[in-house]
Image: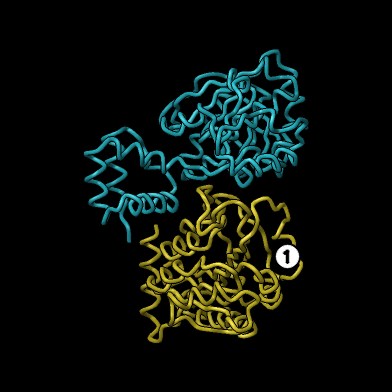
Chain colours: A cyan, B yellow
Amino acid sequence: MTDIEPLINAIHQQYGYDLRDYARASLIRRLSLAMKKERLRDFNEFQDRLLHSPAFFYRLLGVLSVNVSAMFRDPDFYLALRRQVIPLLRTWPFIRIWHAGCANGEEVYSMAILLKEEGLYERSRIYATDFSELILEQAKQGIYSCKNVQTYIENYRLAGGKEDFSCYYRSDYDRVIIRNELKKNIVFAQHNLVSDGSFNEFNLILCRNVMIYFNNALKDRTLRLLHQSLCRFGVLALGKKESLNGTELGFRYDTLAENERLYRRIGW
Amino acid sequence: MESQQNQMNRNTDELHSQPVRGCSPDGVVLIVGSLGGFKAFQRILASLPRKAFQGRKGKSVVMMLHRSPSTTTDLGALLQSHCLLPVSEPDDKDAMVIGHVYIAPADYHLLLEGRHFALSTEGPVNHSRPAIDPLFQSAAFSFGKNCLAVILSGNSDDGAQGAETILKAGGDVWVQNPNECEAPIMPVAALALVPSARILSLDEITAELVALGQATQARWKGEGNEPHV
């Protein structure tokens, strides 16, 4: 029906973004959506635009990296972080956290709020990375539509929030802006899980709902990269429907919370 | 791999002069609903016999219900108490097991990638996540004519476009009779785009599903080197 291989090769050769190991079902879906949005007739015209307009490509990259999330998405997950992971983090003098695939940053700021309330923020540093510069810029700004705030507050409450959520942002017309004190220990940087390597050793790595877009080979490779970047007894957090079961590194992890997909590295 | 599978299906089809839609042993049945769909799910699951769906000539069933993203209820466990077949919510990249009933998890889109599940967190489609259109479109792409879509009661037009795609790919579409639906919008919207869909009451749907399972089992009994189950 749709042959997207030439398109994928063109993106790889022209821009160096390697989508060859992305899961096909959602990639085809997203490329088709982008095609409709840009009013292109078919994938041939798509390829033509792609090769001759870098601006078009970076818009496309934005579409490909869209993850519609919310602050404290999966409140149960943040509750489990608070109850089971924070006590472990407390045992380290300095805490490094890697948020791989941070999208527009909502979940990064949720993590910052959690650390602040547990008194760990001052000795933590969060490295938030994504492969799209465009979306990273949004994340850096921390500006969200006030339409979402109701969901944020509800999630925050369910996640065991201790304060009045409104103290973490200020309103500006129809938007909310995350306060600067939550941003100061967060480093936003471009990093591509497909092609880039490990860049530090972390006590906690969150890679949630990122590998669902990869095929099995790339998922395994990414898990190896995360493994290399995790200190011993460090914690790995995956999305609610992702699992280490059946992966080659699974046996090197202990399950901290089965339902919330929190794993602790125990082996080399 | 997909093309290989298609090739295989084509060959087996040539063996039988009379084509029966959705009646191949590696097909998938997609059952979807929204408002009022849960009750219908319970009734359908309660009447699925183990024998007709399990074994090498069985089928997988994938169900999707529009549900609130914040819900934490384990729909799989709730429905399991009505069903003889194993029911669960799939994880990302899980292989689809024959004779198994899968329920789409909350707050993700569910896609079929060959015989594996793929989840996605892209934005709501037709105001919903999970949404039916992406599931149907990916199923049509992966399974072609070996997929059967059953659209039940619901208050949205989600699923209509996907149903059209499935029909174009050679699959089959059944729609619950809007007159007996708690919310008729979804079946009506599907019928508007796919007028040739079969209109069935819930009782007829369950009966036809059982018959389909049994027919698949019977048709493939003793064919070539296929052992009896």
* Res B89 quadrant in image: bottom right
Q: Residue furthest front?
A: A173
Q: Residue furthest top?
A: A93
Q: What subunit carries mark 1?
A: B
Q: Which residue is at 50% across, 40% downward?
A: A219
The vertical placement of B138 against A177, above or below, is: below
SS under mark 1: helix
Label 1 environment density (alpha carbons within 10 Å; few <14, some 14–19, many ≥20)? some
- The image position of residue A249, as x and y in percent, is 59, 35
Question: Which amino acid lies under the numbered mark 1 shown in the image of this protein?
Answer: Gln
Q: Which residue is at 36% across, 73% downward?
A: B11
- Quarter of the image with the N terminus of chain B is bottom left
Image label count:
1
* Res B154 quadrant in image: bottom right
- The image position of residue A19, as x and y in percent, is 38, 41
- The image position of residue A244, as x and y in percent, is 61, 41
The vertical placement of A226 against A75, above or below, is: above
- Quarter of the image with the C terminus of chain B is bottom right
- The image position of residue B116, as x and y in percent, is 51, 56
The vertical placement of A181 against A243, above or below, is: above
Judging depth in this view, the residue of B156 and A249 nearest the camera is B156
Name the side, left or right, on which A163 lies relative to B58.
right
Residue at label 1? B80
Name the side, left or right, on which B25 lies relative to A148.
left
